[in-house]
Image (cartoon, coloured by chain):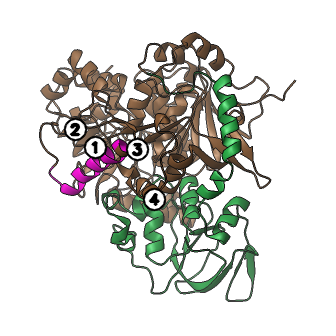
Amino acid sequence: MTPFTTLTAPVAVLDRANIDTDQIIPARFLRKPRSAGYGQFLFADLGLTLPRDAAILVAGENFGCGSSREGAVYALIDAGISCVIAPSFGDIFAGNAAQNGLLTVALALAGLADGTVLTIDLPAEVVRLPDGTARSFTIDAFRKQRLLAGRDDIDLTLSHAAAIAAFVRQDRTARPWAGVTG
Amino acid sequence: MSAPRTLLDKLWDSHAILTRDDGASLLWIDRHFVHEGSFHAFGMLDHAHRPVHRPDLTVGVADHYVPSHARTRPIADPEVAGMVAQLQANTVRHGIRLFGLDDARQGIVHVAGPEQGLTLPGLTIVCGDSHTSTHGAFGALGFGIGASEVAHVLATQTLWQRRPRNLRVVLNGALGVHVAAKDLILAIIARLGAGGAVGHVIEYAGTAIRALEMEARMTVCNMSIEAGARAGMVAPDDTTFQWLAGRPFAPADFDAAIAAWRTLPSDAEARFDREVTLDAAAIAPTVTWGTSPETAVPVTASVPDPAAEPDAARRARIGEQLDYMGLTPGTKLDGLTVDRVFIGSCTNARLPDLRAAAAVLRGRRAAVPGLVVPGSVPVKRAAEAEGLDRIFRDAGLIWGEPGCSMCVGTNGDTVPRGERCAATSNRNFQGRQGPGARTHLMSPAMAAAAAVRGAITDVRRLMP
């Protein structure tokens, strides 16, 4: 995945609360291979078209609530969105976003118009507005590191193979009932 | 002496392999369920030439794309058929146990897993499906994950997570007659809001929860995600152990397992980050009017009037929902005409759910078309042994084959545009049951009452 550091781009504004993942991408498209390009499915039943060149989506609270479908993140990324700013996010959506290099910024930014150009500075954890002001945000340190590096977690996890093996050994004694039998 | 801990704390501590300075913990995963939608994750694994680390702890279940029509007929849509075939191919190739289309254990993953005894107290359970919170009914930590995390679990049997906060929802008192677990959880979601429990795991407690049978606890935990919670849990007790005894995958030394499970409930002095209390006796049969489960209200209520809402953003949100749902402010919900009913889903397709619906439909005719889809093959067979299928068929409803069906519509079972559906499923999102579909969530008994009257109906009036 592409590392995320800073981004200066126009916004698309979707000022509604509880935009769930069924609205981001209806379930009937989830059987499509990623190679089909998920951008065409974004907000398919909302009749919305994003302004040209928008790479930042500014949305209402609880954005991405609902199902765990990672297709919601693919649809945003394939439509050119690299960052979503909303007062709050569905937990699973935010996790999926970070796995794919899509930055979620938990911030209430009211009154923006489509096309407003923002700068997102992930290392500094600030959003810079056109009037020269800046709004700071916080992000989980582990997710931030992953976004900055543009890596997936599997290699990192496999580097802990010895700790995992030690856990499994002690766990077999501690919880002999936990395996799959039968 | 160690500090008092919650059920979640105990689960977390027994599964954290390591915790980094930045707060991310690497958790061991005891059970991983995969379904047709997991194909993205298998693709990622294959792309990186990685094997499945613990196929023995991974179980495949065909549910999202399986047809509800007879299995002797082929699946008409080649893309849908391909999804079912692809799960078969991926699980066979990686040596993963599969409850496939023709398996006597097949069902919705959140029905079949517990039913087979794969879901146990004290386990971490994940699946690429947000309703994995269902498994918390057993005192397990079950939560939904996305495709990248599915790939990570397949490759490592672990997951990086940050410890969620503890939220206890206490329900005291007894539920009224014809008031079900579904009404209870809808009332909780209305109280918390659709995002009210984000970042938290809910532990459900209190006398009303203790009195629930396992299937009802599953209904409650299932919809935790609709309040934004990472998971929902109920501390295991004798009800749990009795339900699990003798299940095919229950531990061989069951008594030793019970002894371990008895140590899981939250300590008396354990501290919760938040606590919410509701009076179970005050909960009425509940229905939703809007496009978020948080719009749950007693069936005796009316459609809200946006003009009465002082906050501009909320007013707009109510207006948008009424517009989509085709509703006029002030309309009584009791008596609102519906076009069809759906009884099924991982929320409400277990045997007690079907019994509750059948009790209302017995000797009556449905005024509108409807589909009844049992949660699993064992549920279907048990229901048929009791003659419940006859009751549904005699009422004029379709008796289907187990799967997710019209809850999410991925198998082609959808509600036509503009139609109003009384549904026992978990989401009334815009377009959830099909483009333009209008969903009202309710309990199985309430959906059956809606079928009989062709309108949303207070089941207490129909079943005095």
Residue that protrudes farthest toward the bottom in the picture: A131
Report the predominant secondary structure element of the magenta stretch.
Answer: helix
**Are the numbered discs 4 and 3 placed on the same chain, yes or no?**
yes
Residue under the image location 87 percent in, 23 percent down? B1
Marks 4/1 in contact by CB < 8 Å: the verdict is no
User: Which numbered circle lies on residue B44?
Assistant: 4
Quadrant of the frame with the C terminus of chain B:
top left
From this view, report whether residue B121 is shown above or below residue B13.
above
Which mark is first along the chain, 1 or 3? 3
Q: What colour has chain B?
A: brown
Q: Nearer the viewer, residue B309 or B185?
A: B185
Which amino acid type is shown beneath numbered disc 1?
Answer: Ser
**Left or right of B236 on screen, residue B344:** left
- Image x and y of residue B367, in percent: 16, 36
Which amino acid type is shown beneath numbered disc 4?
Answer: Met
Q: Which residues are magenta?
A: B76-92
Location of residue B463 (image quadrant): top left
Q: What colour has chain A?
A: green
User: Which numbered circle lies on residue B371?
Assistant: 2
Q: CA distance from mark 3 to mark 1?
A: 27 Å
- Image x and y of residue A182, in percent: 43, 21
Give the residue number, with chain letter if any, for mark 3.
B94
Residue under the image location 54 percent in, 13 percent down? B254
Q: Viewer-nearest of labels 2 and 3?
A: 3
Which mark is first along the chain, 3 or 4? 4
Q: Viewer-nearest of labels 2 and 1?
A: 1
**Are the numbered discs 4 and 1 placed on the same chain, yes or no?**
yes
Q: Categorize mark 2 by other alpha carbons within 10 Å: few (<14), some (14-19), many (20+).
A: many
Whether residue A87 is visible, yes or no, is: yes
Q: CA distance from mark 4 to mark 3?
A: 14 Å
- Numbered-mark total: 4
Give the residue number, with chain letter if any, for mark 1.
B405
